[in-house]
Image (cartoon, rainbow, N blue to C red):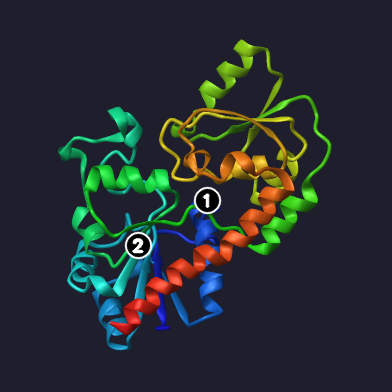
Amino acid sequence: MKKLVFISDFFSEHVQGGAEIYDNVLIQELKKKTKVAMFQSHEFGLKHLDFYLSHDYNFIISNFVNLSQEVIKRLQSIGDRYIIIEHDHKYLKNRNPSDFKDFKAPQQFIINKSFYSSAKKVFCQTEKHRSVIYQNLKIDNLVSLSCSLWSKEQLDLIRDSITEKNDRAYVMNDKNPIKGVEKSIKLCESKGIPYDLIDKLPQEEFIKKLAKYDKFVFFPKTLETFSRVILEARMLGCKLVTNNLNSCTHEPWFKDCKGEALIDFVDKQRDIVVEKIIDCLNKQQET
C-alpha cells in the first residue's frame, strides 16, 4: 500500500481524548503496513501537501478544525487521495445534531459538505453516526466501522482491572458541558443512588478507578458518535445509567456483549476495522 500522511488537530501526546487514543491505535496498526508521516493540522500547509503528493503519499484526515482552507480546497480537487476518519460532527456549525429534531439540522447549519463529499470514503464510528451524517449531508461515500479501537495493551489493562464492585456510582466530573455532569448528579440524587463525582483522570487511572464501581452514570447532551467510556464501563462489568445518545448502544452486538466477552469482541474488531480502512487505501492505489 502507498505511504500515508495522517493529519489531525491533536495526537495522543497532546490530548488524551477518545479521538486521539483511537487515532494512536490506528496509526500504530498502519505503521505495521507502511510508512506513516504525522502532522498536526495547523502546521500542514500547501508546501507539505505538494511535497507528499509528488512522493505518492495518500492522506488520512482525522480532526481538521485547524486545517487551512487552502489545503482543504486542494485536497477536494484530488478526492481519491484522501479519506476522513470522522470522530464527531464537524459537518455542523454547532457540532451538535442533538439540538435538532431527529438530528436533522437546517441547511444554514451545514458546513464542510464539499470536503466530506469529495473524500474517497468518510469512515464513521457507528451505523447511527453514519445515518445521522447521511441525513444531513446526503452523500454516498459513508462507511460505518461499527466499533472503536483499543490496543491489545489497553484491553489487557481493562481485563486485569476487573474486580469486585462497591455499591456506588461513578460520575465523571468533566468540565465540558456537553458531557451532562449536572444531569448525572441530579439523577443520582433524585433516585437516591450513592455516587462519587470524580475529576477526569489519565486513562490507566480512570480504568482502575472505574472498575471498582457498581454503576457508571453518564448523560451526554450531544450524540456521542461511539462513546468509548460507555463501552469501557461495560467491559469492566459496571451497570450503565445513561440516555440514548451513545451510538455504541445502537449497534446490534451491544446488548449481547459485556464483561470479558465484550473485551474479546472488541479485540477481534480491531483487525476488522483496520482492514476496512486499509482495503480502501489499497483501492486508491489500484486506481
Disc 2 crowd, CA 10 A, few/some/many (<14, 14-19, 20+): many
Q: Nearer the viewer, residue 192 or 185?
A: 192
Q: Amino acid at mark 2?
A: Ile
The mark found on residue 57 in the picture is: none
Residue located 53% across and 27% down the image: 181
Q: Which mark is residue 18?
A: 1
Using the image, determine if residue 50 lies above or below residue 117: below
Which residue is outermost to the bottom?
55
Q: Based on the displayed image, in which of its 4 quarters is residue 50 positioned?
A: bottom left
Determine whether 186 is above or below 29 in the image.
Answer: above
Label 2 secondary element: strand
Question: In the figure, 245 relative to 145: above or below?
Answer: above
Q: How many marks?
A: 2
| Whole-percent x, y for residue 209 in the image | 74, 40
Disc 1 on helix, strand or loop? helix
| Residue 146 percent location from the top left of the image | 48, 52
- Identify the image quadrant of residue 200: top right
User: In which quarter of the view is residue 187 placed?
Assistant: top right
- Residues 95 and 129: in front is 129
Q: Which residue is mark 2?
A: 84
Task: Answer with mark 1 or mark 2, whichever residue precedes in sequence.
Answer: 1
Residue 103 can be seen, yes or no:
yes
Label 1 crowd bin: few (<14), some (14–19), many (20+), radius 10 Å: some
Where residue 91 sits in the image (x, y, percent)? 27, 48
Looking at the image, which residue is at 38% across and 68% down?
60
Mark 1 belongs to which amino acid?
A: Gly
Which quarter of the rendered picture does the C terminus lie within?
A: bottom left
Q: Position of residue 257 (x, y in %)?
A: 65, 44
Q: For the residues marked 1 and 2, what is the alpha-carbon distance in whole angstroms?
A: 16 Å
